[in-house]
Image (cartoon, rainbow, N blue to C red):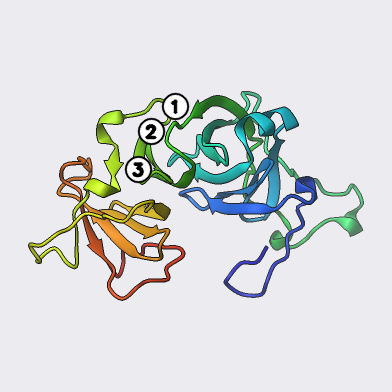
């Protein structure tokens, strides 16, 4: 695993075995990051890079729900949701035990010549002993899950291969009134153009989705290589008010990211 800044740092993950890494994602504060493989979920501390907690799913769980595909943090880092290949959502709670004591506590040797004199040799951060617990399992009855993004402290959006964007709460319940259907969203070149046409092609769905409340919408990539931005007058994203704006000249998009500084 490499960081894009400075010299490459190679991190060994022996607890993950030979499983294929599906995703690496930081929490909002960039203090923790999750490593998701097909069969396991591990939580690491960022600086220093040390593992905190790890959970591997059983063969029975994988057979029933499918392998891990995507992961998304709750904004307050109290939960992580994992999407599986068979269209399930696995909700994990992340907490600190009541008898809280930091991990990786360093103690000096009783021998004076072996003690550390420099402050740089001490870990200043308190690394919490987190506990990872599976709290809920939800079946998404709408095809495979192709994308997932958290929009508020209480809700997240789930893109499926049936061309829908579903809204789920962090307790596992679905907010059906706010489901988006790509075939009913009008798309145009820009918001000043009055002519807007919905997607008419069959089997068109979202393969990557990102959300920014500061920009005010979703950046999406479709399975046919096109890209667009979904916006609405309010951040409630009422299905009757959502509008799509095409990213012109793009036919081979694979993924997307939003930078609110450059809008």
Rendered residue at 73%/60% (across/down)? 11
Question: In the rendering, which numbered label is found on residue 165?
Answer: 3
Q: Please report the residue visible at 26 percent of the width from the left and 35 percent of the height from the top.
A: 178
Residue 172 is labelled as 1
Q: Residue 243: in sight, yes or no? A: yes
Q: Quadrant of residue 133?
A: top right
In the foreground, 172 or 94 = 172
Label 1 CA crowd tier, 10 Å (few <14, some 14–19, many 20+): some
- Callout 2 touching callout 1 (CB < 8 Å): yes
> Which residue in the structure is indicated by mark 2?
168
Q: Secondary structure at mark 2?
A: strand
- Asked if residue 151 shows in the view, the reply is no
Q: CA distance from mark 2 to mark 1?
A: 6 Å
Query: Above or below — where is 179 with respect to 216?
Result: above
Question: On the rendered structure, is 148 left or right of 115?
Answer: left
Question: Is 145 positioned to the left or the right of 190 in the image?
Answer: right
Residue 214 vs 74, above or below: the answer is: below
63 lies left or right of 14: left
In the foreground, 147 or 78: 147
């Amino acid at each position: 695993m490499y960081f894009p800044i400075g010299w490459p740092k190679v991190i060994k993950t022996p607890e993950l075995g030979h499983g294929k890494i599906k995703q690496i994602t930081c929490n909002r504060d960039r203090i923790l990051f999750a490593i998701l493989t097909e069969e396991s979920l591990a939580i690491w501390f960022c600086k220093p890079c040390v593992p905190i907690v790890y959970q591997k799913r059983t063969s029975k769980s994988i057979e029933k729900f499918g392998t891990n595909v995507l992961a998304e943090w709750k904004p307050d880092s109290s939960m992580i949701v994992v999407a599986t290949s068979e269209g399930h959502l696995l909700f994990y709670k992340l907490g600190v035990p009541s008898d809280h004591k930091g991990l990786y506590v360093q103690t000096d040797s009783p021998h004076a010549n072996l003690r550390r004199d420099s402050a740089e040799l001490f870990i200043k951060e308190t690394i919490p002993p987190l506990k990872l617990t599976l709290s809920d399992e939800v079946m998404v009855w709408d095809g495979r899950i192709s994308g997932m993004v958290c929009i508020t402290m209480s809700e997240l959006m789930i893109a499926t291969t049936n061309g829908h964007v579903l809204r789920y709460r962090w307790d596992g319940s679905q907010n059906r009134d706010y489901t988006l259907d790509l075939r009913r969203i009008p798309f145009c070149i820009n918001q000043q153009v009055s002519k807007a046409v919905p997607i008419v092609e069959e089997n068109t769905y979202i393969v990557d989705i990102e959300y920014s409340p500061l920009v005010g919408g979703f950046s999406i990539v479709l399975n046919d290589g096109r890209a667009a931005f979904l916006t609405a007058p309010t951040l409630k994203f009422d299905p009757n008010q959502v509008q799509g704006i095409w990213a012109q000249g793009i036919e081979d998009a694979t993924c997307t990211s939003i930078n609110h500084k450059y809008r």
